[in-house]
Image: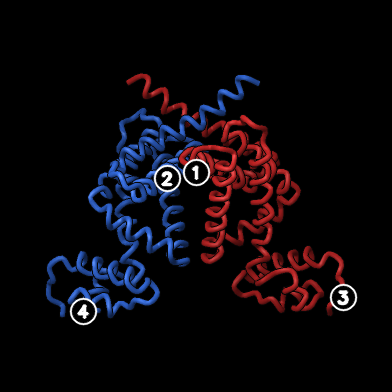
Chain colours: A blue, B red
Amino acid sequence: MGRWEPNARERLEQAALELFQERGYAQTTVQEIAARAGLTERTFFRYFADKREVLFWGAGTLQKLIVDAIADAPEGTPPLDAVAAGLEAAATMLQPRREHARARHALILADADLRERELHKLASLASAMADALRGRGVADLAAVLTAEAGIAVFKVAFERWIELTKSRELSRHIRASLDELKAVIDGVGQTKKNE
Amino acid sequence: MGRWEPNARERLEQAALELFQERGYAQTTVQEIAARAGLTERTFFRYFADKREVLFWGAGTLQKLIVDAIADAPEGTPPLDAVAAGLEAAATMLQPRREHARARHALILADADLRERELHKLASLASAMADALRGRGVADLAAVLTAEAGIAVFKVAFERWIELTKSRELSRHIRASLDELKAVIDGVGQTKKNE
């Protein structure tokens, strides 16, 4: 106890995912996760505040990546392009972890508490993205709408990435969803012209 | 007990909002709500499954209005225009209840459980809107993105409607948000052309 354990976080995360899939999230204890990983409960709590955090600790890292990419986009970049750069950064982080992302997503869909937690994390992300856009001088209404549109694109792209069997990259799904969103919006413009 | 009480639902709702604002949502009991309304607990439970439902019973009605308007839009209506028709229908229902909507929104923001519940209701609404679009023959990706874009527009418009002191109508906020979303998306299109 107390000594350094190689790859402790990864081992705990892997053990937790296995147990959640075998027994269900609610039926798994921290003690069981630690035992499966060959570590102590004390080590578990050095890395995660509670059982739920095994599934959500990456959200903060992801949010920081996205927000930093939005802030760092070259001056004059249109708001949705800055958001697209943020989503690309997220895709780069997630791409090597597709199997993990898929397993995590299935667990979240199966548990009401985890679903609510995920919705809350997405709402926080949207809010942080809007703040980053405001920090670039984007007006409030445009900042909020661009952030929400970005979240919609990301959600749709993410679900297609983990659900579809052919192994298209997440970043390509993001670009396809952005293009589809543009097509949808252009449909409205056209109708108005024909009135 | 058991006899018909005039305007029981409205009286219970009004009493609940008053008490939630005076004492906080968590500190208010169903017994106190019924007493304030001059009714029995039994009458309360004839209208609401629990305390929380006083704040959420309208969500089902709102969702049905929006989904029906999407389904009933004339053939050939572009997806985002069908969604706009749905949001207009919601605005017509909400417009006379601005003070209620404002009080309800403040209560929800102040309580974590209520915030999660509200996020969940919005996610259900997005899902029902996407289903209604698929029912019109809209392809899956376009349906999901249009529904999510509609939710973003509605959230932003709703918050502006209840926060801003000048009494612009909700439907005008919805149209302004839709126009802003279009402008944001067009910004991207322009950048791509200039590459």
For badge 4, the amino acid type reads Thr
What is the number of the mark on residue A156?
A: 2
Query: How busy is the neighbourhood of tag 2: few (under 14 within 10 Å), some, or many (20 plus)?
Result: many
Q: Are marks 1 and 2 in contact (CB under 8 Å)?
A: yes
Query: How busy is the neighbourhood of tag 1: few (under 14 within 10 Å), some, or many (20 plus)?
Result: many
Position above or below: A18 against B191: below
Chain of the residue where label 1 is placed in the rendered structure: B
Tell me if A111 is positioned left or right of B58 in this view.
left
Tell me if A12 is positioned left or right of B189 in this view.
left
Query: How busy is the neighbourhood of tag 3: few (under 14 within 10 Å), some, or many (20 plus)?
Result: few
- Residue A183 locus on image (x, y percent): 47, 30
Position above or below: B62 against A38: above
Position above or below: B101 against B7: above
Tell me if B33 is positioned left or right of B52 in this view.
right
What is the number of the mark on residue B144?
A: 1
Secondary element under disc 2, as helix, strand or loop, is helix
Circles 4 and 2 on the same chain: yes
What is the number of the mark on residue B3?
A: 3
**Mark 4 highlights which residue?**
A40
- Residue B22 locus on image (x, y percent): 67, 68
Q: How far is disc 3 from disc 4 in space, using C-alphas?
A: 62 Å
For badge 2, the amino acid type reads Val
